[in-house]
Image (cartoon, grey):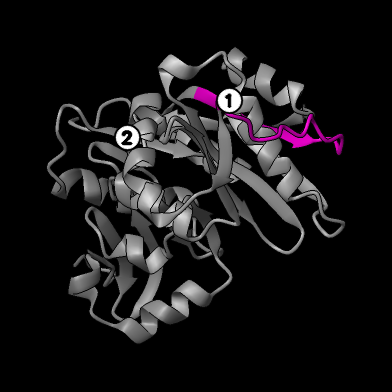
Amino acid sequence: MNATGQTVSTLQEFGNDQSLYAFLKGNHRTHAHLDWRSPLEWLEKTPSCIYHNGAHIDGVLSLAPDPVHYHWVRFLSLRNELSPANVWKTLFGSILNSYQFASADMITALCYQNWMETLLFTHGWKKVQKVIVLTWQGILPQKYENDSSIMMRKMKLDDLQQVIHIDDLCFDTYWKFSPTTLTLAFEQSGYSSVAVMDDRIVGFQISSADLYRAHLVRLAVLPEFRKHGIGARLVSNMLWHFSMPWIRQITVNTQYDNEASIHLYRHSGFEYQGEFFPIFQYPNPLG
């Protein structure tokens, strides 16, 4: 603890659930990249910390890895009246000093808000990628019928092992999902489906939804079955499922330089209208 009474603690060291719950319910400057978990679930994991004076919390931060070696800024919340730079420097510096990062570890952040982008840029983080948002324009693509070669059906819990295998083959670096995250995505999805050939799952899609919007979260096809229209069938299956009067918007994200994905989504009726989110990376977690 320093002279001002401020200190940084882990959730377990802090030990005041009532103060933490009250802080999490407050109207603070917040960045959240939760991936189907609550802020508290991330803060329970290492490395995470709380900046506080006694029971009074000024900020919280979680860089918990998922999967191993991939440390997204999962949750950051700072009191509005405080300097974001000062609180961030204390929280992030505490994690750098106390957590044993490995040479393979990557610390990254998907910036949804300008203040977060400015904060990271001014603290030496580098912009390494850009995610663009494509919005469906309301024109339904071809409705594929199941035939003898390929069948579309709703994803089942028993499918998850095959789905996890496909996902692991299809995504790398920032875009990796752990089996736990993929399972949570399925369990909380608005609609998930698989493409089946000869009793084998060769592709899948997972989409989230609320009362008015749907979002294509994950789309993957086994590498050896690509360029056979399976991705287009999965996207079509998803769009037809959500073709209801109360669903007012359907979106999908992809990397700005992923030409194959952009071509597929545009062919399915999505268009890029200028919305994007930069990805920043901390240069060297080992210091």
**Res 219 label:** none
Question: Can you give x and y, in whole percent of width and height, for residue 15 in the image?
Answer: 23, 80
For the residue pair 245 and 54, the one nearer the viewer reads as: 245
Residue where numbered disc 1 is placed:
230
Magenta stretch?
A: 129-149
Q: Position of 67 compared to 113: left or right?
A: left
Which three-letter amino acid code belongs to the residue tagged 2? His
Residue drawn where x is 70% and y is 34% of the image: 145
Q: Position of 226 compared to 144: left or right?
A: left
Residue drawn where x is 78% and y is 36% of the image: 136
Question: Can you give x and y, in whole percent of width and height, for residue 134 in the image?
Answer: 71, 32
Question: Can you give x and y, in whole percent of width and height, for residue 186 in the image?
Answer: 46, 53
Q: Is residue 87 visible?
A: no
Instruction: Report the quarter where the C terminus lies.
Output: top left
Residue where numbered disc 2 is placed:
165
Say what secondary structure mark 2 lies in.
helix
Question: Can you give x and y, in whole percent of width and height, for residue 246 in the image?
Answer: 83, 60
Q: Main SS of the magenta segment?
A: loop
For the residue pair 273 and 259, the one nearer the viewer reads as: 259
Front of the two marks 1 and 2 = 1
Say what secondary structure mark 1 lies in.
helix
| Quadrant hosting residue 270 | top right
Q: Is residue 248 visible?
A: yes
Residue 147 magenta-highlighted: yes
Residue drawn where x is 16% and y is 38% of the image: 101
